[in-house]
């Protein structure tokens, strides 16, 4: 199997993850390094409209249920666990089968996976239900059908876009999102900004992967240059 390097992008809503992933795709393309965008945590619609959103009947059938906030806490945890398991299984399949074949067909000897959200976001979510959960325990979920433990994929390097609360709120307000989505994101930033920062510090202390904190308040191209500077030496060595 050809070596595959995984680069994670993380941060709160409107931090600029998608923008940086698109810039990195262009950067890698110019270096003739195959890349694949995946979702590391959360959900996806399964309709194939975004780079990380491959068509999937399973996600199409389940997507709306992940946003039903009238259900019980136990049911919410079950769905989070279900989404995490599905995402982890899909990502392993994409990495070990689909992307490996793509690299081989392109006659290249390596490739890069760009991960939109990572285990950092998952830990942040799980701590809202289990405040004392450890980083390592948050990485695994148990399949209710066969009790199999499934682990999330850890990126080789993760870039966390550190943006001030005020700037995130400004970006939310100026976005073209529908009003309900805009309000949801604004409430998350207002109520959970400090919580995310605390979760991030715990993750950095765990030393699970190489985490770079990037000043996401800077213009997108300046942020990209900082990320690119960190990556160029790494990519030449792997």
Image (cartoon, helix red, strand yellow):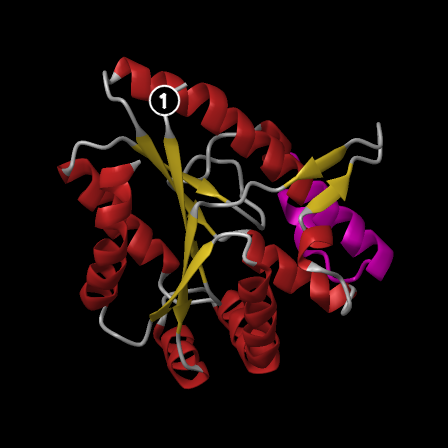
The span picked out in magenta is 61-83
Residue drawn at 79 percent across, 31 percent down:
148
Q: Is residue 64 magenta?
A: yes
The residue carrying mark 1 is 2
Residue drawn at 66 percent across, 43 percent down:
83
Does residue 62 appear in this view?
no
Residue 26 x/y as whole percent = 20, 44
Give whichever of 58, 26 is nearer the camera.
26
> In terms of secondary structure, where does tag 1 sit?
loop
The number of numbered badges drawn on the structure is 1
**Is residue 114 depicted above or below 48 in this figure?**
below
Q: Is residue 75 magenta?
A: yes
Q: Estimate how packed mark 1 is, as few (under 14), some (14 to 19) or many (20 or more) residues with alpha carbons within 10 Å.
A: some
**Is residue 190 depicted above or below 40 in this figure?**
below
Q: Please indicate whether residue 5 sits to the left or right of residue 191 in the image.
A: left
Does residue 225 appear in this view?
yes
Residue drawn at 65 percent across, 48 percent down:
64
Give whichever of 206, 120 is nearer the camera.
206
Quadrant of the image for the N terminus? top left
Q: Residue 92 falls in which quadrant of the image? A: top right
Give whichever of 80, 110 is nearer the camera.
110
Residue drawn at 33 percent across, 20 percent down:
102
Furthest-bottom residue in view?
A: 166
Residue 168 x/y as whole percent = 41, 77
**Is residue 86 depicted above or below 183 in this figure?**
above
Quadrant of the image for the C terminus? top left
Q: Please indicate whether residue 13 sits to the left or right of residue 79 in the image.
A: left
Q: Main secondary structure of the magenta part?
A: helix
Q: Residue 17 falls in which quadrant of the image? A: bottom left
Residue 97 x/y as whole percent = 47, 19
Residue 28 x/y as whole percent = 22, 40
Furthest-left residue in view?
A: 30
């Amino acid at each position: 199997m050809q070596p595959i390097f995984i680069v994670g992008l993380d941060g709160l809503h409107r931090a600029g993850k998608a923008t940086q992933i698109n810039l990195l795709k262009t950067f890698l393309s110019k270096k003739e390094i195959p890349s694949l965008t995946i979702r590391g945590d959360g959900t996806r619609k399964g309709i194939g409209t975004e780079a990380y959103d491959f068509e999937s009947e399973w996600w199409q059938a389940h997507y709306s249920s992940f946003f039903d906030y009238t259900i019980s806490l136990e049911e919410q945890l079950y769905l989070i666990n279900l989404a995490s398991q599905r995402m982890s299984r899909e990502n392993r399949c994409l990495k070990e089968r689909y992307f490996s074949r793509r690299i081989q067909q392109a006659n290249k000897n390596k490739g890069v996976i760009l991960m939109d959200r990572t285990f950092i976001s998952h830990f942040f979510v799980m701590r809202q239900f289990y405040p004392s959960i450890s980083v390592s325990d948050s990485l695994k979920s148990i399949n209710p059908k066969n009790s199999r433990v499934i682990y999330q994929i850890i990126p080789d390097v993760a870039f966390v876009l550190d943006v001030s609360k005020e700037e995130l709120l400004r970006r939310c307000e100026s976005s073209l999102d529908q009003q309900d989505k805009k309000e949801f994101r604004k409430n998350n930033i207002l109520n959970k900004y400090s919580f995310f920062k605390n979760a991030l510090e715990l993750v950095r202390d765990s030393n699970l992967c190489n985490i770079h904190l990037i000043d996401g308040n800077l213009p997108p191209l300046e942020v990209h240059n900082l990320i690119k500077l960190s990556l160029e030496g790494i990519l030449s060595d792997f």
